[in-house]
Amino acid sequence: MSTVPAQATEPPRDCALCPRLHQFIADWRVKEPEWHNAPVPAFLPKGGDDNVSLLIVGLAPGLRGANKSGRPFTGDYAGDLLYSTLKRFGFAEGEYEARPDDSLTLIDAAIVNAVRCVPPENKPVGSEINTCREHFFAPTMKRFKNMKAILTLGVIAHQSTVRALGGRVAAHKFAHGARQEVAGFSIFSSYHCSRYNTNTGRLTEDMFVSVFRDIREFLDN
């Protein structure tokens, strides 16, 4: 996979490729002018693109999470679980305080959303997923020349990742805890670490930790 420059993979602040998302953000800029309210950029490790061995793929920014803070998984419950687990397995250090200027830094890992803009009701539609993948998500993956593993959080993130790598979704179906090989990369899959999934028991902390244990063992070996 050839690398591409970072500036070519980040959507502009006023990206209007998806009219519904563009209008939704515009409405929230009026309601909450102090929020980020824009496409959320990739969160990179110390050392930048060349230090990424693990890419974590989420669905889209949460309204009062990343859309407010401007950093993936920052400001809502999903970040509490994700970043504590990243620290446990050596992929992050510092203190996560649910704001972008805390002391948290990533190590050998990057985080990006399959859809960069917050969607109404946390539900992007197919055309929005496809557009963001074509223009930003797939090119972003090509930035990381040392990437070996990808963690997809949820079905949509998994499917978009498979498609971005040129794979067939039918041949690489989502399953929690699974590991699949696509285009020379190992894709690990987990249910999304949302409060809904943990409250309903679909995802437990032990289940989430188990996936990261598999990733850590794979990368260490």
Image (tube, rainbow, N blue to C red):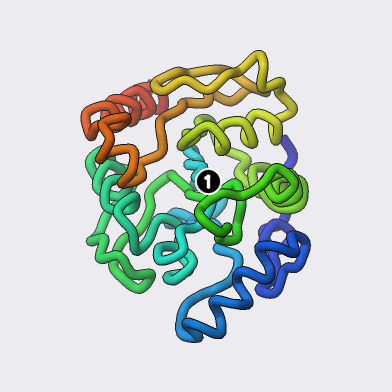
The secondary element bearing badge 1 is classed as: loop
Residue at mark 1: 59
Q: Position of residue 195 (x, y in %)?
A: 31, 46
> Which is nearer the eye, 95 or 70?
70
User: Please, is residue 1 above or below residue 107 in the view?
Assistant: above
The amino acid beneath tag 1 is Leu
Quadrant placement of the N terminus: top right
Which residue lies at the image location 38% right of the left edge and 53% below the top edge?
106
Please report the residue visible at 25 percent of the width from the left and 65 percent of the height from the top: 97
80 vs 150, nearest the viewer: 80
Residue 141: x and y in percent read 64, 43
Is 66 left, or right, of 198 in this rendering?
Answer: right
Give the residue drawn at x 60%, y 46%. Answer: 114
Q: Quadrant of residue 178?
A: top left
When the figure is inspected, residue 12 is found, relative to residue 121, above or below; the finding is below
Against 100, residue 4 (above or below) is: above
Q: Is residue 139 left or right of residue 205?
A: right
Q: Residue at x 54, y 17 (%)?
A: 180
